[in-house]
Image (cartoon, rainbow, N blue to C red):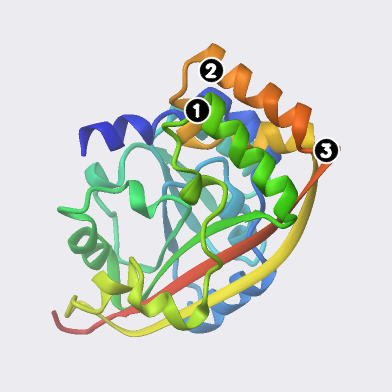
Amino acid sequence: MAGERVRARVFGEVADDYERFRPDYPPALIDDVLAYAGLDGAAALEVGAGTGKATVAFAERGVAVTALEPDEAMARVLARRVAGHPEVTVEVGAFEDFVPPQPFGLLLSAQAWHWTDPAVRWQRAAAALAPGGTLALFWNGGRPADPDVRAAIVAAHHTHAPDIDTAVEIDPEPTLEAELATSWPGTDLRTLPQFGALSERLYQRERTLSTADYVAYHSTKSACRMLGEQTRANLFQAILDTAGEHVTLTVETVLYLARRQHSG
């Protein structure tokens, strides 16, 4: 777990690029979370807020958010982005160390829940939520849509960064909504008496970037941040040389919803 915690803190090296090049979350997802949660003025806790991709989306819907972010560089970008939202409070620190001042109606985590400590995350989530409160966990993923472009990017990794698992980072299997319940974190949630009324959603869209912007986006991934500087430069140059002028991504966003039970 220590290695994962270190890897979780590399995003601050490229905090501004993370904000610029990472995709937003679908408006339909925000709609679905709020419809499920029925907050009625209750506040939200966000775990691993990053640069505020999800934070701003919920704040713009009138949700008061306490946004936790462990990386100081990411938190600075986050604070800048929510400066016009007085209903957002930014806390620099880890979820594992946070003491909730009151129970929350919603605990959300965008692109971050897998970085939390598996030994305590579910107990801490249950403790942070009011009875009947909502847990919403979601991630963006996907792959280059064009098979030739995808193959070129995979080949560049095999040549210059063979330790990166391209089946995870570049060419994952397409997500099937019917399989979400049997994938993590659904598999964990189904074993926990503290949570019920489970629901999973899948959202799909396309996003086209210049190849230079794709490289900048790819550079914000933890697997690339862990590479040596020269290795990373060689990899990115190979992508620029072989992938054409643009990269269209099939973006898949998965959402897991659960309700805090009144007992358990």
In the image, 92 versus 19, the foreground residue is: 19
Report, in whole angstroms, how far the alpha carbon at label 3 lies from the one at label 2: 21 Å
Answer with mark 1 or mark 3, whichever residue precedes in sequence: 1
Quote the CA–CA distance across marks 2 and 1.
7 Å
Res. 37 in view: no
Q: Which residue is mark 2?
A: 231
Cα gap from disc 1 to disc 3, whole angstroms = 20 Å
Q: In this figure, which residue is indicated by the disc labeled 1?
A: 161
Whole-percent x, y for residue 111 in the image: 48, 52
Name the residue at 33% across, 73% down. Answer: 186
SS assignment at label 2:
helix
Query: Residue 244: which disc?
Result: 3
Disc 1 crowd rating (10 Å Cα; few below 14, some 14-19, many 20+) is many
Q: Are marks 3 and 2 in contact (CB under 8 Å)?
A: no
Instruction: Name the side, left or right, on which 215 lies relative to 253.
Output: right
Q: Amino acid at mark 1?
A: Ala
Quadrant of the rendered image containing residue 120? bottom left
The reply, left or right, for residue 201 in relation to residue 94 is right
Name the residue type under label 2: Thr
Residue at position x 21%, y 64% in the image: 127
Tell me whether the residue at label 2 lies in contact with that at label 1, contact meaning CB atoms closer than 8 angstroms: yes
- The residue depicted at 42 percent of the width and 50 percent of the height is 112
